[in-house]
Image: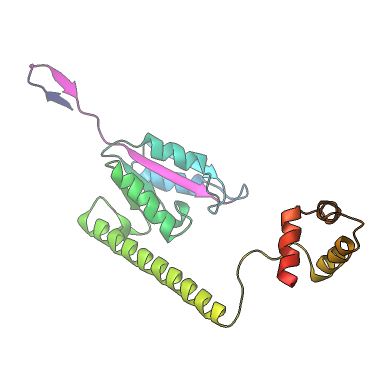
Amino acid sequence: MRDKTDTGTTEPIPSRLLLGYARVSTDDQDLTNQRAELHAVGCTKIFSEKITGTRRDRPELARMLDHLRPGDIVTVTRLDRLARSTRDLLDIAEHIQSGGAGLRSLAEPWADTTTPAGRMVMTVFAGIAEFERSLIVERTRSGRVAAKARGVKFGPRPTLTHVQVKHARQLIDQGDHTVSEVAKLLGVHRTTLYRAIARTE
């Protein structure tokens, strides 16, 4: 299709692309079925890879997202082929939508962001995910407060054991070794040794 401009010339209007994304977890699995389904619904370009969904670095997914243009539609056979988690799905969907493109899943038609209903569902999912995240943060904070009230101490564990500190103090008190020498003997910085001795006093 061509569009007539103010100068009387015609310029081509880029047609939207149906882009497919297919993924299997191991080399033992086959991408043939996913590719066939995506071709059947009109995908003209398919990005596919054999890689576990838990990995963040998925080169073909990154290439597809970089390839997107306004009006394009990303199609997957199932959402778990695209995302590692609900949060990951929402992040990818937001990236796609921010570029003016759409997302749809053949197995989950409710996730079609090219329709008002699909966009509404994804918005609800985003709200639920944010609510769950806030609950986890609050539970973690409450748990730390309760643990501190019981006397639980947080932070890194002491580098030196009580026996090591006691031995180090004996060596220093005898006057045969400096703090730096004893610290080097124990494989720690002298500041660490000073702090460890201070905690035992």
What residue is drawn where x is 13% and y is 25%?
3
What residue is drawn where x is 50% and y is 48%?
23
x and y percentages locating residue 103 in the rendered image: 33, 49
Towards the viewer: 23 or 192: 192
- Relative to 122, is 166 on the left or the right? right
Towards the viewer: 45 or 169: 169
x and y percentages locating residue 171 in the rendered image: 89, 62
Q: Is residue 176 above or below residue 141?
A: above
- Picture quadrant where residue 173 is located: bottom right
What residue is drawn where x is 51% and y is 44%?
58
Q: Is residue 162 visible?
A: yes
x and y percentages locating residue 45 in the rendered image: 39, 36
Q: Which of the image's four quarters has the C terminus?
A: bottom right
The magenta span reads 7-25
- Picture quadrant where residue 54 is located: bottom right
x and y percentages locating residue 181 in the rendered image: 85, 52
Q: Is residue 78 visible?
A: no
Towards the viewer: 93 or 105: 93
- Residue 24 belongs to magenta span: yes
